[in-house]
Amino acid sequence: MTRQKERVCIIGSGNWGSSVAKIIGENVQKHADMFEPIVNQWVFEEQYQGRPLTEVINTTHENPKYLPGIRLADTIHAEPDLIKACQDCTVLVFVLPHQFVRGVCDDLAGSIKPSVKAISLVKGLEIKPDRITLFSEEIGRRLQIDQVAALSGANIADEVARENFCESTIGSRSEAAGQLFYHLFDTPYFRVNVIPDYVGVELCGALKNVVAMAAGISDGLDYGSNTKAALIRLGLMEMRKFGQTFFGGVEDATFFESCGVADLITTCSGGRNRKVAEAFARTGKPIDVLEKELLNGQKLQGSLTAVEIHHFLAPRGMTKEFPLFDTVYRIIYEGAPLDTVVKL
Amino acid sequence: MTRQKERVCIIGSGNWGSSVAKIIGENVQKHADMFEPIVNQWVFEEQYQGRPLTEVINTTHENPKYLPGIRLADTIHAEPDLIKACQDCTVLVFVLPHQFVRGVCDDLAGSIKPSVKAISLVKGLEIKPDRITLFSEEIGRRLQIDQVAALSGANIADEVARENFCESTIGSRSEAAGQLFYHLFDTPYFRVNVIPDYVGVELCGALKNVVAMAAGISDGLDYGSNTKAALIRLGLMEMRKFGQTFFGGVEDATFFESCGVADLITTCSGGRNRKVAEAFARTGKPIDVLEKELLNGQKLQGSLTAVEIHHFLAPRGMTKEFPLFDTVYRIIYEGAPLDTVVKL
């Protein structure tokens, strides 16, 4: 008796989605007993040098727009129609900007079987004054599926695509689904640890960006490496406290994983949040101006998360219990002096 | 009834010893109820611009040789005679290179009361094939005193002296001694956490240097920040495992302290161990040649510790259980290819 093979669809095709497509394309061949060889990738259709991007990907086996120079497996099939891309798939990999998650889920709802397993590589959280929504849970709710895992780690997409060694963390409530995703993602250059604490995995991926803002402000003040290391450590402690205060099962051990300390280190050394915060400290220009100048008008995740955290903590009278998060908010939005970043 | 005030002697006057003298000079004034105002500092006598260094310190209130431009409190009294410096002192602060610790203790033995409290800021460990010696324990044994704490953290001396915000960790078995040292060291720019796990504090301070060698090799190979973050994380895990395997009371929580993750981050971003290892990877020159070229012939701590760990683990058949430590050793001393650093 052979068990039914899993059929995978990757939903998303940006820089990170394309890097992930490279890994998955390799792994479905390596684990041919577990996975169907053909992997669909839903690609938001656009024109690339006069041709549809999906056609370019399917003929050149490369996504020249978002990951130029990196060859994908021939068995990655780019598909512009979302429903068609996901049809008969048993595994869905969500790797798209967070603002598109709801729309995509609503388009898919009804055509997805309850047994489908999904994994969220979506960055960020949705923090509203009344509640915090994890994207894994949102995907599960909208598609009415039980098993949604999350993946996060110190994974700058271009470096992963170049096969530079790194690690990543998968949080999965179900051990069986965790093992499935392990085989889908783990390679000798992309080492995956599976842990049960999916909440911690997703929280780390969002909250780290606020810590990176603090690190950037410190850099902008030329405070040196002791200070920056102290802020990173204090940030890690606040991430942990936030998880433990507002979510039940967040484990200390999660912060030792790639999604915790390693991703925090990467984000606080390079990364756009750190960079924009440094420019903020050096120039005094408001964040929205810097977003225009440095990010082509894209919104910065860290400052957005800092606001959301503030509006979540303030009605609970708890801003002072998270002094680093609070200070970043006050510096960026309330004109608090820059050096309050070290007066926690 | 007033309790007897503590009388402090700082043993050592290098770059770190002088930065610490600055802090202690401020704190004995601030906590005048606990400490005598005069603090002795044992200074290894040498000539500075034709005058004895102790005389220069006592007249200019600055150590121009090891910490130029930083004013020390007037109450810091430099003293070239070790026995005299420590006479009637109830608190000894050891802050000198590890190779001098034994000699100093042997000179002091017999003139120190059993009730004296000491703290070791000595960097490193002594790892012999048959046992690992912590300097706090060695000081306690040689002076026959019970209470020896340890201090370690992300504390580059010059940045501390410039009052850039940072944190540090004190490990003290005794809570009372821990509180005493807290008041001696904690300032708004040098925040101290006291924990009971003095073993973990000292271990972190030594083992981090081996991890920094791995980080430096990764930098020399231009592997990027994902890889470096992964190596730092794997190194942290090996530091933890080493502590838990060979010492009873090493706590997970210690690695979240400044002496753990924060110091590791600082050491792996700047720091001589990282720098020499990067040069090793780029040039292929042996470590002893690079020590001459880059460190004026001073011995590098990280490579020394890697050798010592190897000679400790090998007879126990345990080198493979610490793949990162082992790989650093094999790359530096056995000609293993550089890229084995990511083939753990």
Image (cartoon, coloured by chain):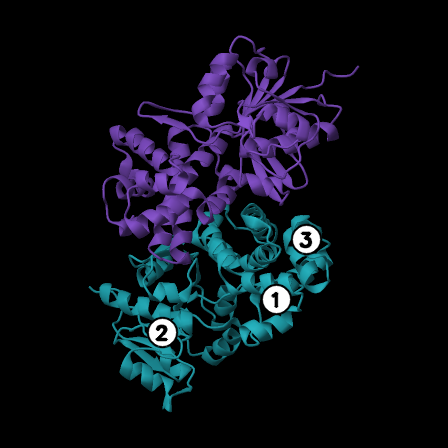
Chain colours: A cyan, B purple
Q: Earlier in the sequence, mark 3 or mark 1?
A: 1
Mark 3 and 2 residues: CB-CB less than 8 Å, in contact?
no
In front of the other: A158 or B301? B301
The chain ID associated with circle 2 is A
Q: Amino acid at mark 1?
A: Leu
**Residues at marks 2 and 1, CA–CA distance in whole angstroms:** 30 Å
Q: Amino acid at mark 3?
A: Asp
Q: Amino acid at mark 2?
A: Cys
Q: How crowded is the residue under tag 3: few (<14 C-alpha within 10 Å), some, or many (20+)?
A: some
Give the label on residue A339, or none: 3
- Left or right for B302, reference A261: left
Q: Residue under label 1, please give it.
A: A304
Q: Residue under label 2, please give it.
A: A9
**Residues at marks 3 and 1, CA–CA distance in whole angstroms:** 21 Å
Label 3, secondary structure: give it.
helix
Q: Position of residue A316 (x, y in %)?
A: 71, 56
Residue B301 to residue A34: above or below: above
In front of the other: A291 or A134? A291
Q: Position of residue B111 (x, y in %)?
A: 56, 9
**Residues at marks 3 and 2, CA–CA distance in whole angstroms:** 48 Å
Q: How crowded is the residue under tag 1: few (<14 C-alpha within 10 Å), some, or many (20+)?
A: some
| Residue at the outermost left position | A1
Q: Residue at x 74, y 31 (%)?
A: B30
Residue A290 to residue B101: above or below: below
Label 1, secondary structure: give it.
helix
Residue A161 to residue B201: above or below: below
